[in-house]
Amino acid sequence: MKKMAELKYHFGLKVRIYPSDTQKQLIKRNSDASRFVYNEMVAINKELWQLRRVKLPIDTVRSRINQLKERKNAKAMSNHFQFLNAEGIDSLAKANAIQNYNRAWKNFHQTPGTGIPKFHRKSSVWKYQTNCQYPKQKEAWLTNGTAKFVDAKHFKLPKLDVIRIKGSKKRLSQLLSRTDQTRIGTVTITKDATDRFFLSLQLGSDTPFVSAFPATKRQVGIDLNTENFLTTSDNTVVANPRYYRTIKGKLAKAQRTLARRQRRAKKEHRSLRNSKNYQQQRLVVAKISAKVADRRRNFLHQLSTTLIKNHDLVVAEELRSKNLLKNHALAMSIADVGWRSFLSMLEYKATLYGHQFVTVNPKNTTQTCHNCGFVMGTEGTDKLTLGDRQWECPKCHVHHIRDHNAAQNILTKGLEQLA
């Protein structure tokens, strides 16, 4: 049986789950155990770093270092902290917490700008990971592992047993009717701030999960901007829905109420975790924020799928949203549009559906005339500002709409990059 990494195609599936009260308690217990193990790994490495700075050959220091090193695996940690062996705690949840900690260090060393692993604090969000195992099976299917589909409406999980699920009927029926072997890898159970529970599955197979979109023989360049969400090289303009701006007044009012209840609870020396009024209002604030995020995500998914489906090649400019957010005049508008998420969707959907997506350096894409190649800011001319939405080329006298011209230049750069 092949491992997940050896399989050619991978696919992610996220469904809503509806656990019983007993199952909710088990999810909370596993989430707490996973967080404790992760934090213990952080604490062990912090202490090891401090002990290694002691240059004197002290036997006590050496002994302590050896003790901490031996504790850095799930079994040894469970033996040291006996409550981790409690009934209902998934051993794979502890192993995944250690694996995630090691992966965080790997990302720190390999990805610039990534910070070192830090302590995870308690919050209203619960999360832990387990794995589907095939101990005696010779073939891997969606219905014969330790984590498996019972039918299109139920899923069986280690420690939690059978749990009700809800997702796209079309997608679930397609997966369950597959005639090719399909393996379930990592399984993530999550409760978000609005008390919704989700199940995320990593699937692997040697055959594709979706069919590639047919070739269209069309290419498009897209210019992302805050005035409109995007403008394409064929002059299609997609309006910016501004989901956060439409709801920020209601959110601010709810947050003020939450702050008052927090101050009142602290004044009366009541724990926020046990303050019913505070928790009710926290849920109101979380639901408003989640509504904005859900609407934005749905918009980005529909738009990215449409672009990939209707074009063989999509070209966009490279964005550094972190740097753009330093502009306080535009920070809210930039954060509201979700450019980084949109580009990530275009990237993975292009791979998934057999089309192509590339990014290009945005330098001078706005300032360059698409017709003759003249660059504004040269030969005694002034650069275009954000307020210049339309302009005329001083060399060839062609009238340009700023965003359309930029999208055409982006497409040209993408084609040159691929040539």
Image (cartoon, rainbow, N blue to C red):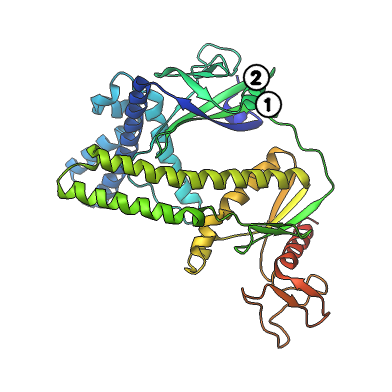
Residue 223 seen by the camera: yes
Q: Secondary structure at mark 1?
A: loop
Mark 2 packing: few (<14 Cα in 10 Å), some, or many (20+)? few
Q: Is residue 237 left or right of residue 27?
A: right
Residue 371 is situated, as x and y percent measured from the top left of the image, at 82, 72
The one nearer the camera, 410 or 85, is 410
Residue at image position (69%, 70%) is 366
Q: Is residue 359 above or below residue 146?
A: below
Q: Assign the C terminus to one quadrant of the image.
A: bottom right
The one nearer the camera, 182 or 127, is 127
Q: Assign the N terminus to one quadrant of the image.
A: top right
Residue 181 numbered mark, or none: 2
Residue at image position (39%, 50%) is 116
The one nearer the camera, 252 or 323, is 252
Three-letter code for the amino acid on which mark 2 is drawn: Gln
Residue 221 numbered mark, or none: none
Q: Is residue 166 left or right of residue 267?
A: right
Residue 383 is situated, as x and y percent measured from the top left of the image, at 66, 80
Asked whether the beta carbons under mark 1 and mark 2 sit within 8 Å of each other, the answer is yes
Residue at image position (74%, 32%) is 211
Mark 1 packing: few (<14 Cα in 10 Å), some, or many (20+)? some
Question: Pointer 1: what residue?
Answer: 206
Q: Is residue 170 above or below residue 305?
A: above
Q: Is residue 212 above or below residue 205?
A: below
Give the mark nearer the N terminus: 1 vs 2.
Answer: 2
Residue 186 is situated, as x and y percent measured from the top left of the image, at 50, 29
Distance (Cα) linking label 1 and label 2: 8 Å
Q: Secondary structure at mark 2?
A: loop
Q: Is residue 355 above or below residue 180?
A: below
